[in-house]
Structure formats: structure tokens, C-alpha cells
Image (tube, rainbow, N blue to C red):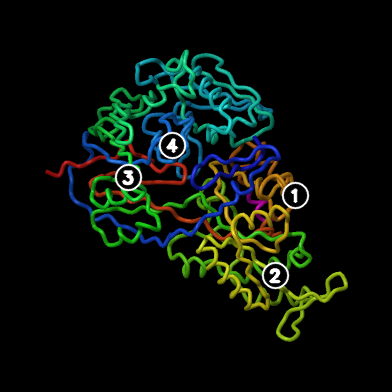
Amino acid sequence: MKKGLFLVSLIIITAMFSGCNIDLGGLLEQNRDEDYSFLDGSIDDVLDTGPVKGGTLNLFSTIPDTLNPIFTANAFIKDYSCFVYEGLIKLDEKQRPIPVLAKNWEVSDTGLIWTFHLRSDVYWHDNIPFTAEDVEFTAGVIAGAGLDSSYFTIFENIARFTALDSQTFEIELHTPNSFTPGLMTFPIIPKHYYMGENIEISPKNNTPIGTGPYKFVEYREDEYIRLQSNRDWWNSNKKGEGEPDLPHIEEINIKVYTKGSSYINAFQAGEIDIIEADKNNWYSYSGRTDVILKKYVSNRFEFVAFNLSNKILEDKEVRRAISLAIDRNKIINDIMPGGAVMADLPIIPDTFMYDTNTISYEKDIEESKNILSESGWKERGGLLYKRINGINTSLTLELLVNTDNGFRLEMAEEIKRQLEEIGVILNISAVGWEQVLDKIKTHKFDMVLTGCTVTSIPDISFLYSSSEIGIGINIAGYSEQVVDNYLERILKENDPAMKKAYFINMKETITGDIPYIGLFFYYDAIVYSKRVRGKFGPSAWNKYEDFTRWYIPDIG
């Protein structure tokens, strides 16, 4: 596994990088025109009796390729795997790893050996005990699957893995990575169930067995998948506290749709209880009293990259002046009201490593002009000039953007207008996505407006480490030894307080150098039918957080 935060494609979270054979298009987001003009939904409460046992939750999926979560490329099936399967850990709302099938874990002094101690009270849905051999088996399947599994990059930095005994699983890394627990979210599948089977083609993949709160009941091809609550779930909350055992909802019915718009119509008709909002159906939910809308910060980050080898942009004072001239708040409010949250770095704000939403550079036109003046830029005929390498050079730059992204085209025009206020002439080069990638790869650009999708571990090496130049998406060509040192320390440091301190110090250096201008993270949204109640707390890492406590009220 490469040092750094792995990026994945927007639609199918599978395209990660390895070695030098990088698919830059899989790391940078094309992010086609999408509508994120979100409105806040509010709950119009109807009195009910509180949590009750029973009812059916109706969901939807496109046609599954497989129900095995290790191999599926279907984003819906991958999301729904949390109903049947569990991982060693999961991430909470602050992006911190918390135990699930693992009780706890520890790391050696070298930072290379991680030991996970497993729960002893967990059983598979066929009543066979869960053991470390199941974890070892799952790890072997993922490691052997390569690109056929979306989890394969987790194991690129793992030298070996083994079940030490029935309740202890150990991995040894090639290089230290203090974020390793955050990678152990992959679903565990049962070893005994696949004994003697070729797992890649086994028909058992479509009759799954897990350890989770719901059991598989039936899959009727192109029609539905039915799940039933697991009465013997290890985490069922059987404490006699008056609340029904978990999960509250008795059955999940996942309807399979072959046409893209069919499930949207089904939600509108009340046949489906949960749907993700997108540009095609957002406004149809506005003003409805029978739905609840919950926004959450997605893992899709937009930024402007500078070409640091450009004779104008190699001067960080110019980059600083440009940063001070860009009004990110105006961009968001004018183009996608309520649809994004500002961010300097590719780490979701208000998470454990980045528990703030403070922006380093807010619009200050006067300060921006002063910086340029003090840096030797002088006005002549309405243009700013400076003698660079013996040549009179105008402060004229080109901003690269892909034509098939309406939001980015609007943002580019707004950035152009804003930079005109300080005398910077910005010409927009709008070309197809493949041409954008070609210009980035050949480093033939001044500035580029693009984006990426970040994964679950808050390591920003991919964008800021000098080791990623040419093989990652450090497309600015940023190289700073102080930052490299901090990135390395963070990966070696297992004390959360020290790790955060390193990050804060590193952030000061990065925001002083400004190789990139972080713009924002998009919001995503999920819409719920009001027939379903409970706490809804979707996140980029878990759209169905607390689903075991959802219920369908009996209101007479």
C-alpha cells in the first residue's frame, strides 16, 4: 500500500493507485454536472408509541452483480452489506475507529505489527462461532482478488497476516501506518461456508451468511432481496431496559430495479423508504411533509491546483494574493446554495484530525493588491507586469477546467471575475476530461480546477508528499521537506494527541506555501419516508448509521 490517503472514483469505489502505473483519471474526479442545491428538511413529528419491534423497511438496488461484499462493484449492494456483515471496526461520525468484531487492538513499538483481539460471543447466522480464522480467510480472499475487490489496496502495505489463535488476528506492515485500524472496516466473510468452493464463482455468494443484525432470506433475481432480523445478534441489547431488542425493524426488502428512473417513481409513490437525492429528483422533495431530508458532508473535495514550475506561480506571494482574492463563500452561495462546506485541505471538517471549519484565507482584496505591489508587480495600460528572468511578463494565467461539468464551468467564470479585481487576467481553457488529464500528466497548465474523492483515513500524503510527484496526484509538483517529515511522523505516531499536533503544525506550513487552493467539500443528502423513525446520522463512511435503532411506529 502506498504511503498516503488513497483516492477512489466517485461512482464505484474501486479505482485506487498502486506503484507507478497510475490511472490519473481514476484519482482526479471528472465530477460531471450535478445539482447540490440543498434545502434543509425538518421533521414534522407525528406522535407514536416509540420504538417497537416489527415492520418492513423498503429499499432499492440496481441489478446486483453478486451479493458477496468482497467482490461486488454495485454501490448499493456494498452499502447494504452492513445489514448482514460486520468488520473488525467501523468509523464514527468523527472518523475515529471504534470496535465492532474486534474488542481492541495494539501496535508494536516498531509500528509494524498490529494485533486485533476479537469478540468471543459472536456467531455466524448458521450458529458457527466467529473466529480469527474467518478474518484470516477474508484477508486472503481480498489480497488474492486484486482489482476484483474494492478493498484490495488495504493489503498493499501488509507483509503478512495470520490468526494467532481463535480470538487473535495479527498483521505485519511493510512500513508504519498509524491509520491502520481505520482500514479494518472491510466485511468479514465465513471461512467454513466456502470450504471446498471456488469463492469467485461460488453460487453461495448469492446466499450470504454474516454475523450482522440481519440474516439473508431470499434473492429473487431482478425482483428483490429479503433480509430478516437476527434474533441472536451478539449486539442485540438484551438488557431488560424496556426497549425492544435490536434491530427494531423486523424485515428489509430490497427491491431490484432495471431502469434508472423506476426507483425514483417508487419513492415518490411511497413504495421505497429511503433514497439518495440527486439533480434529477431533488426538487420533487421540496415542501413535502411526508419525508425527512438529512444532509451530510461527502468525501468529494474540490480544489484549484497551481503548476509550481510556472514562472509566475512559482512565487508563493502570487499564490497568496490569488488565494486572498478568491471568495469561496460567494462561489458556494451563488452557484450551489447550501450545497457545500468550505475546506482548505482534503480532510473532512469537524473530524478528529481536523476538528475545525476555520478557513486560512478569506477574501481581502486590499491585502491581495498590496502583496502583488510589494512583490514588484506594476500596472501598465491596465495590466500588471513584472520583469521575470529578464523578460517583461504580464500577470496573465490560464485556468484549465473540464467542459462536461457545469458547476466547474460556473466556478471558473466566477474565479475569473474575482481575480480581475486584483488585476490578474485569467483565461479559461475549457476542454474535455481526457484533454484535462493529458495536460495534467504532461504538466502543461497554469492552474486547474478539479476534485478528488478521499477515503476513510485522513492522510493527505497523496496531494502533498514529494514522493507522490509523478505517481500520485501531487499535480502541483509540491515538494517541501518539512511537510514530508510531518507526513512521515504522522504515519508513525500512534498517540492521537501528538498526531494531531503534527498535523496542525504541518497545516501551517502548507497554508503558507499554498500549492493548492482548497475550495470545499460537497454535501450529499438522503431522504427518508416519515413512516420510518429513529436517529438518522448518515456520513460519508456510513450512510446507515444507527439503522438497528430505526423503527416503524405503530400509530394505530
Q: State yes or no: discs 2 and 4 in contact (Cβ < 8 Å).
A: no
How far separated are the C-alphas under marks 1 and 4?
A: 39 Å
**Quadrant in which the N terminus appears:** top right
Residue at image point 49% right, 65% down:
332
Amino acid type of the residue tagged 3 in the rendering: Lys
The tag on residue 482 is 1
Q: Is residue 505 magenta?
A: yes
Amino acid type of the residue tagged 4 in the rendering: Lys
How far separated are the C-alphas under marks 3 and 2?
A: 49 Å
Span of residues in magenta? 503-509
Which tag is nearer the camera, tag 3 or tag 4? 4
Q: In which quarter of the image is residue 244?
A: top left
Counting residues from the N terminus, which is met first, the one under dot 2 or under dot 1?
A: 2
How far separated are the C-alphas under marks 1 and 3?
A: 43 Å
Counting residues from the N terminus, which is met first, the one under dot 1 or under dot 3?
A: 1
Residue at image point 59% right, 56% down:
433
Amino acid type of the residue tagged 2 in the rendering: Leu
How far separated are the C-alphas under marks 2 and 4?
A: 43 Å
The tag on residue 78 is 4
Amino acid type of the residue tagged 1 in the rendering: Val
Q: State yes or no: discs 1 and 3 in contact (Cβ < 8 Å).
A: no
- At numbered mark 3, what does the secondary structure look like: helix, strand or loop? loop
The tag on residue 397 is 2
The tag on residue 401 is none
Using the image, determine if residue 219 lies above or below residue 94. Answer: above
The percent coordinates of residue 112 (x first, y second) are 66, 28
